[in-house]
Amino acid sequence: MSIKSVTVYAASSQALDAVYIDAAERLGRTLGAAGLRIVYGGGSTGLMGAMADGAIAEGAQVHGIIPEFLTRVEQGHQGLHELEVVSDMRERKARMLAEGDAVIALPGGCGTFEELFEAMTLKRLGQFLGPIVLINTTGYYDRLLDFLAHSVTERFMNRTHLDMWQTVEHPEDAIDAMREAVAWSAHDALESAAVRRST
């Protein structure tokens, strides 16, 4: 699969430890240096802003998508190639996923979790086929990954579903993770979407 555009999910919190800010900025620089177009939530603060700033510094084309009611809270980034203002969160999420060939999730809160789980769900159903990469800065996603493995153990998911995403500790490894992602097809996804009783 050819990856030209990457959707990045990230937090807008302004109270984060510097280690998260640094990792987000490095991800932006890594994606920008690779010549990838970046789509994200359009904010200028927190990990959103740091990632966008890093990408812009490398000359990347960065496309932000932000709902109108959040333009004051998240302070739409004014240095982007394009800042698209949409009507609501549903449109934002749909547009962000539609614009990306792959998804990368930096650490985040419930908004980031919602976006990430929607991408995973659509991949499970064969509606999104691109790589999904979690940037596991300082082990941030460890408990979530354990819980997903628990979902497989309890048969809410199939073991093949653990191949829907890749996890890296360092942002610089995201490019290789996308390239090495397990191939996913709509047909195979639907065949394994439901967990069936073994005979």
Image: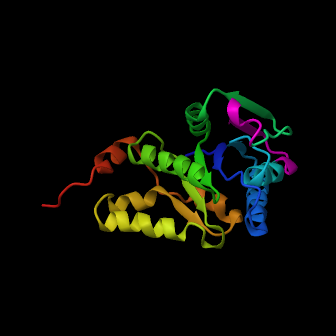
Spot occupied by residue 42 in the image (x, y as percentages of width and height) = 73, 40
Spot occupied by residue 150 in the image (x, y as percentages of width and height) = 37, 68
Q: Is residue 164 magenta?
A: no
Colouring of the image: rainbow
Spot occupied by residue 168 in the image (x, y as percentages of width and height) = 60, 67
Residue that lies at the very extreme toward the left in this rendered image? 199
Q: Which residues are magenta?
A: 56-73
Does residue 177 sit above or below 12 in this rendering? below
Closer to the camera, 23 or 92? 92
* Res 141 quadrant in image: bottom right
Total numbered labels placed on residues in the image:
0
- The quarter of the rendered structure image containing the C terminus is bottom left
**Residue at screen point 74% across, 41% down:** 73
Does residue 61 sit above or below 30 in this rendering? above
Is residue 121 in view? yes
Q: Is residue 71 magenta?
A: yes
**Residue at screen point 56% across, 52% down:** 110
Residue that lies at the very extreme toward the bottom in this rendered image? 138
**Residue at screen point 72% across, 30% down:** 84
Spot occupied by residue 187 in the image (x, y as percentages of width and height) = 34, 42
Closer to the camera, 179 or 135? 135
Does residue 192 sit above or below 41 in this rendering? below
Residue that lies at the very extreme toward the top in this rendered image? 87
- Give the side of residue 167 with respect to residue 22, left or right: left
- Give the side of residue 64 with respect to residue 117, left or right: right
**Residue at screen point 58% across, 47% down:** 102
Closer to the camera, 115 or 183? 115
- Give the side of residue 81 with respect to residue 119, left or right: right
Is residue 67 in view? no
Closer to the camera, 77 or 130? 77
